[in-house]
């Protein structure tokens, strides 16, 4: 079947600002040249009919029906997009389409890329004009309220706002952002994407538990210092001054203190990283990304043995400026900023050492090298 329109929604990586968007922290992101392709046409009979070239089965439902509970399959993302859009607009036309992802699932916010594509397509089919920030908010709401992942807007913002050869710097509290062009003093780099061979669902991982722990840490600090409290859903680490944390860190349960330490130290790393990016200091930028990963391991306490192994191997390789876990860091992938002319050396050494430690992933471990790219868009 021939479709009238084509949307490319890229995957994203976060070099600095990990695990803090749900606490209204500062984040950075790149979109890159692999992602989700969605070909579609408006459906004037009001039906949504979708095929996936990545997952089995077909999805079909009327656009006018009340949103139903999750079905537990890949079609939930289309239902989630419909759910969030329907809260704001009357949807009369459906879509018929086909979707395909270009890399393995895990760590690159493929779910957010899919949601962005569906939101853009359903809006277009119903003559709804959305700003970029509206696309971000609607896709994020679909993931939180329908899919059930209590994340912030880092993923969707990186997928929608990013530009080629630029770093997205976003304050998730105010939603103010800058897209910062690569300095002429900075050497060329590519993004290394290293898949562990494992995939994971964030909803069934400890992701939501970590969000709750961060909120509990903020609540503890306020309570120990006789500050006014709100319900946990309205409590964020960003609203608690670091001075309060320093005054309270030894008194509250240490697992909560570690989550707070990650938040406050990541805030500083993002600030330093933006300055390093602006001045073309990719070595410092990479070092800060490694520090972020160390804090993710020891303070945020995420990272499977496989991901930790990849990180420890890659940071020792010539041509790797730095990197960290991608996504929530429970399985998935690691990312790195690499020198383009060292790619084959990095591929060979990383593959050999990783498979020496984990030979069971010989058929599923993958190495890819990508370039930064523009955000989600219609393709002519």
Image (spheres, grey):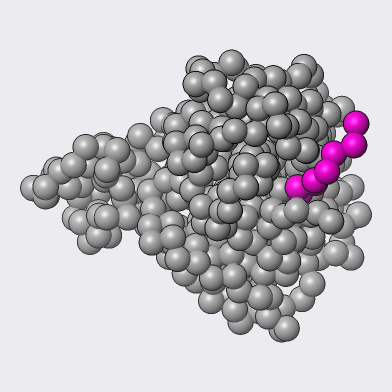
Q: In this rendering, is residue 304 above or below 190?
A: above
Note whether residue 241 is visible: yes
Vertical relation: 217 (above or below) 62: below
Quarter containing the N terminus: top right
The residue positioned 60% from the left and 27% from the top of the image is 63
Which image quadrant is residue 116 in?
A: top right
Is 291 a magenta residue?
Answer: no
- Span highlighted in magenta in the image: 1-8
Residue 327 in picture, x, y percent from top left: 60, 43
**Relative horizontal placement of residue 234, taking residue 223 as reference (left or right):** right
Rendered residue at 77%/17% (across/down): 57
Nearer the observer, 151 or 341: 151
Q: Residue at x 61, y 60 (%)?
A: 161
Question: Image quarter for residue 165?
Answer: bottom right
Residue 226 position within the rendered picture, expressed as x and y whole percent measured from the top left: 8, 47
- Please state if 215 lies on the left or on the right of 285 as rendered: left
Asked whether residue 111 is in view, the answer is no
Indicate the quadrant containing the C terminus: top left, top right, bottom left or bottom right: bottom right
How many labels, in total?
0
Whether residue 138 sits left or right of residue 376 in the image: it is: left
| Quarter occupied by residue 317 | bottom right
On screen, 344 above or below 334? below
Q: Residue 7 in magenta?
A: yes
Q: Position of residue 178 (x, y in %)?
A: 54, 70
Q: Position of residue 61 (x, y in %)?
A: 64, 20
Q: Is residue 163 left or right of residue 224?
A: right
Task: Write the residue at 85% across / 64% down.
Answer: 340
């Amino acid at each position: 079947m021939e479709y009238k329109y084509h949307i490319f929604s890229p995957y994203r990586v976060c070099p600095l600002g990990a695990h803090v968007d749900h606490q209204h922290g500062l984040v950075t992101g790149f979109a890159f040249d692999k992602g989700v392709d969605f070909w579609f046409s408006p459906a004037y009979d009001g039906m949504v009919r979708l095929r996936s070239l990545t997952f089995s089965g077909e999805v079909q439902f009327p656009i006018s029906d009340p949103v139903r509970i999750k079905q537990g399959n890949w079609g939930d993302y289309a239902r989630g997009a419909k759910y969030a859009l329907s809260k704001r607009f009357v949807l009369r036309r459906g879509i018929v389409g086909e979707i395909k992802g270009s890399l393995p699932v895990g760590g690159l916010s493929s779910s957010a890329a899919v949601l962005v594509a569906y939101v853009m397509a359903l809006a277009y089919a119903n003559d709804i004009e959305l700003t970029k920030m509206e696309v971000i908010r609607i896709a994020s709401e679909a993931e939180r309220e329908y899919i059930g992942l209590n994340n912030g807007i880092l993923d969707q913002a990186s997928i929608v706002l990013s530009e080629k050869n630029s770093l997205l710097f976003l304050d998730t509290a105010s939603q103010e952002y800058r897209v910062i062009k690569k300095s002429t003093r900075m050497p060329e780099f590519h993004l290394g994407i290293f898949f562990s061979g494992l995939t994971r669902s964030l909803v069934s991982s400890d992701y939501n538990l970590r969000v709750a722990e961060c909120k509990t840490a903020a609540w503890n600090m306020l309570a120990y210092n006789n500050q006014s409290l709100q319900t946990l859903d309205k409590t964020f680490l960003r609203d608690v001054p670091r001075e309060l944390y320093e005054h309270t860190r030894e008194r509250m349960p240490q697992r909560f203190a570690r989550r707070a330490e990650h938040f406050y130290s990541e805030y500083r790393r993002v600030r330093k990283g933006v300055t390093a990016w602006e001045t073309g200091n990719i070595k410092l930028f990479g070092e800060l990304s490694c520090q972020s990963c160390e804090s993710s391991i020891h303070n945020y306490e995420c990272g499977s043995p496989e991901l930790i192994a990849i990180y420890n191997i890659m940071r020792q390789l010539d041509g790797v400026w730095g990197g960290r876990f991608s996504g929530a860091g429970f399985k998935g992938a690691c990312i790195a900023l690499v020198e383009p002319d060292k790619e084959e050396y990095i591929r060979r050494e990383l593959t050999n050492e990783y498979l020496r430690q984990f030979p069971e992933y010989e058929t599923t471990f993958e190495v890819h090298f990508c370039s930064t790219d523009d955000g989600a868009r219609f393709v002519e």
